[in-house]
Amino acid sequence: MEGAAAAVAEEDQYTVEGGAVRTSHVQEKRREGSLGSTAPPSTPATRGPWSRTTSVRDWYPDEHPFIRNSRDSDDPNETPYTLTTSGYPLYKRSYMPAALQRQDPIGFYPNRGNHYINYPIHLPGESTTQQAHYTQAIMAPNPLVIALCSDSDKVFSKPLYASPVYAFDGKPTYATGELDYLKVDAQGREFTDRLIDREGDLSLKAEVHRFRMVMNELERMETVLVENEEAWGQLAAAKLGVIRRLEMADANKRINANNQGFVDDALRVNEANLAWAQRLKKR
């Protein structure tokens, strides 16, 4: 990754006059686009080996910023269940009112077909693992899935990521422009969404949604950074101009020359005040 990042930096390098101020524009940034991967724009699509040095958790974090989980035992295989904001377990009866016990939970789908999400659940004291019976995908900026199990009254939830496809020849490496068609404002987005729906993988749909949210926020931040960069360049140039004019006016010498005179004047004022006070006492 370090080598790829260096290649990106080399390919995307700007010429900086004097090594001080870099000039850039929002339009130029928009034309170049955001880096979609560690590969530079000119890198052709290839297949690389699966990472051997990086933990899977680095790419698939098991924590979500809006989810609080807990366990009932010290068994590392136990699937964490969800807590409320008050720290109490969330129970599935919140989604299954007594009058609707024989119906599907509100907002949930049976975990099969196009609504299937791989969510293995291992309950404490059990020797086997079972798939969630009902799932609900929440397409937030950071998508998550809520799951219910028939053998537990608890509610389970975790981040929702695209399921990896393992292959003997490794995973593909995408160049920057190969994912532009997935952006929010990409031309033909409706057709792309139909193709994603036709794939029938809800986790892939969630990952595309996450990509769009991240890229949209990244482009917004790029605009802010570029505008701030240009403002910083203008202020830096103004600062150099002010310093040059102060040098030409020999400001330091002229200001410091008044320092000794200021002290002398202060001493004379103090002496005059002391003399006046002494005269008042004599009276």
Image (cartoon, rainbow, N blue to C red):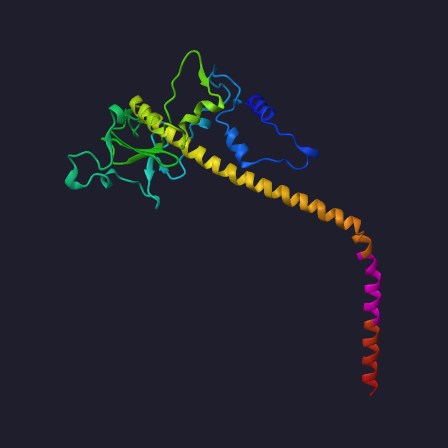
Q: Position of residue 136 (x, y in %)?
A: 28, 33
- Given residues 84 and 191, the one toward you in this image is 191
For the image shown, how many numbered marks are present on the structure?
Answer: 0
Residue 261 covered by magenta stretch: yes
Taking the spot 35% from the left edge, 30% from the top edge, the residue there is: 206
**Could you tell whether 5 is left or right of 62 in the image?**
right
Taking the spot 61% from the left edge, 24% from the top edge, the residue there is: 10
Q: Position of residue 157 (x, y in %)?
A: 33, 34
Instruction: Report whether residue 118 is seen.
Output: no
Q: Quadrant of the N terminus?
A: top right
Q: Residue furthest bottom?
A: 283
Q: Position of residue 149 (x, y in %)?
A: 25, 31
- Given residues 130 and 37, the one toward you in this image is 37
**Could you tell whether 234 is left or right of 119 in the image?**
right
Taking the spot 36% from the left edge, 29% from the top edge, the residue there is: 189
Q: Quadrant of residue 282?
A: bottom right
Q: Residue furthest top?
A: 168
Q: Quadrant of the C terminus?
A: bottom right
Secondary structure of the magenta portion, mostly?
A: helix
Residue 169 covered by magenta stretch: no
Q: Position of residue 155 (x, y in %)?
A: 29, 36
Taking the spot 33% from the left edge, 26% from the top edge, the residue there is: 191
- Given residues 14 and 101, the one toward you in this image is 14
Q: Quadrant of residue 184?
A: top left
Region rendered in magenta? 255-268
**Could you tell whether 59 is left or right of 123 in the image?**
right
Instruction: Report whether residue 264 is seen.
Output: yes
